[in-house]
Amino acid sequence: MTVIGAKNGTVLIAPVYSVSVPASSVVDVDTVSKSLFSAIDYLMSFSNSTNLRTNRMMIRNNGTTLDDQMYARSGFNFAIGVQSISSGSDFKLRVTNSESFSVLVKFSKSVI
């Protein structure tokens, strides 16, 4: 669990999800119904147990289209791509691993 905020003695906690993405593969690491959100803020880490990269990504949903923005990235330069995909009534967070080794993706999300 990750603490995502605290106010007046109340602590908000977000679950941390873990997904292994094999070498040279594409994996949808999260799926959310488009009817359930207007914005999702993702905090992600990518690790091969030696190196670490972190990303922060915002997904916006106006009811018709999805828009994403990666607004922070730091750490090791893995050959990893992250995309927001509209698939029928769902949104999918897709990770493309172009490395020759698997990568562990951990993320938490705040949904509005």
Image (cartoon, rainbow, N blue to C red):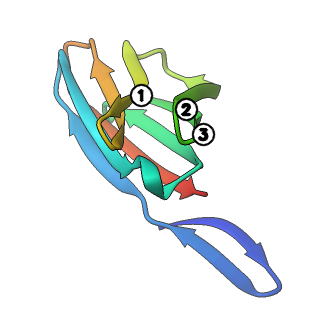
Query: Marks 2 and 1: in contact by CB < 8 Å?
Result: no
The quarter of the displayed image where residue 82 is located: top left
Q: Residues within 10 Å of mark 3 (few under 14, many from 20)?
A: few
**Is 60 on the left or on the right of 101, as rendered?**
right
Q: Earlier in the sequence, mark 2 or mark 3?
A: 2
Using the rendered image of the protein, determine whether residue 20 is visible from the camera's viewpoint: yes
Q: Earlier in the sequence, mark 1 or mark 3?
A: 1
Q: Position of residue 43 (x, y in %)?
A: 54, 44
Q: What kind of element bears circle 2?
A: strand
Q: Position of residue 97 (x, y in %)?
A: 28, 19
Q: Say how many tags the image has.
A: 3
Query: Marks 3 and 2: in contact by CB < 8 Å?
Result: no
Q: Position of residue 27 (x, y in %)?
A: 22, 31
What's the residue at 37%, 18% (across, down)? 80
Distance from disc 1 to disc 3, alpha carbons, whole Å, reads 36 Å
Q: Nearer the viewer, mark 1 or mark 3?
A: 3
Q: In the image, what residue type sits under mark 1?
A: Asn
Residue under pointer 1: 51
Q: Position of residue 91 (x, y in %)?
A: 38, 40
The quarter of the displayed image where residue 67 is located: top right
Q: Which mark is residue 55?
A: 2
What's the residue at 59%, 49% (across, down)? 38
Q: In the image, what residue type sits under mark 2?
A: Asn
Distance from disc 1 to disc 2, alpha carbons, whole Å, reads 14 Å
Distance from disc 2 to disc 3, alpha carbons, whole Å, reads 23 Å
Residue under pointer 3: 62
